[in-house]
Amino acid sequence: MTIRILCVCLGNICRSPAAEGVLRALLPDAVIDSAGTSDWHMGEPPYSPMQAAARARGIDISGLRARQVSAADFGRFDLILCMDAQNMARLEALRPYGSETPVRLFTDFTPESAADHVPDPYYTRDFDGTLDLIETCAAGLAASLRKAQGGR
Ligand code: 4NP
């Protein structure tokens, strides 16, 4: 069964499009999308320093365009991954009555639980550090999905 995963951050121009690009490469059979809790950058491509940092690792996110998350997304995806607790609170406020779609912090999938959120490089300017953490979280998620499917 094809798993559908939505990655969510605040602006949908740094962390969640990077997570989308990394997960698309890692899980080629999955449906991966991303969105922001804000409408600040709707229609814009990922922030150029984020695009450059991803491109340096062979991940092309230039074709992505920002959009705002909506209540309907709870019905379109099997798993919603958020980058920090503020994203999570906003998502939970949007959750339609009766929806059981899991909303998880992406950092829940780091093996050593070293981080409790994905720092926003729009503010920290550490695009590589954020990509390192996103790659760790993505690998942890892929392993957890393989385990859930009975693989190793
Ligand atoms: P993101 O980063 O949530 O990782 O896309 C941000 C990008 C832009 C802004 C905030 C966060 N902004 O304030 O415009």
Image (spheres, rainbow, N blue to C red):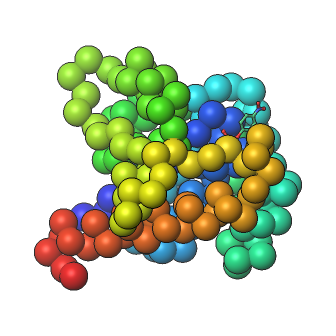
- The C terminus lies in quadrant: bottom left
Please determine whether, in this image, residue 40 is positioned above or below residue 35.
Answer: above
Whether residue 152 appears in this view of the structure is yes
Viewer-proximal residue among 114 and 92: 114
**Could you tell me how many numbered marks the image carries?**
0
Quadrant that contains the N terminus: bottom left
Q: Residue at x 29, y 40 (%)?
A: 102
Q: Is residue 89 above or below residue 29?
A: above
The image position of residue 59, as x and y in percent, is 68, 72
Q: Give how far across and how far down residue 36 sits, in percent.
A: 60, 35
Q: Nearer the viewer, residue 82 or 107?
A: 107
Where residue 88 sits in the image (x, y, percent)?
Answer: 44, 31
Identify the residue shown where x is 80% and y is 51%: 125
Q: Is residue 31 visible?
A: no
- Image coordinates for residue 32, horizontal then vertical, percent: 48, 56
Q: Residue at x 19, y 80 (%)?
A: 151
Q: Is residue 103 left or right of residue 8?
A: left
Q: Is residue 140 above or below residue 97?
A: below
Quarter of the image where ligand 1 sits = top right
Residue shown at the point (76%, 46%) measured from the top left: 124
The answer to which quarter of the image holds residue 96 is top left
The answer to which image quadrant residue 71 occupies is: top left
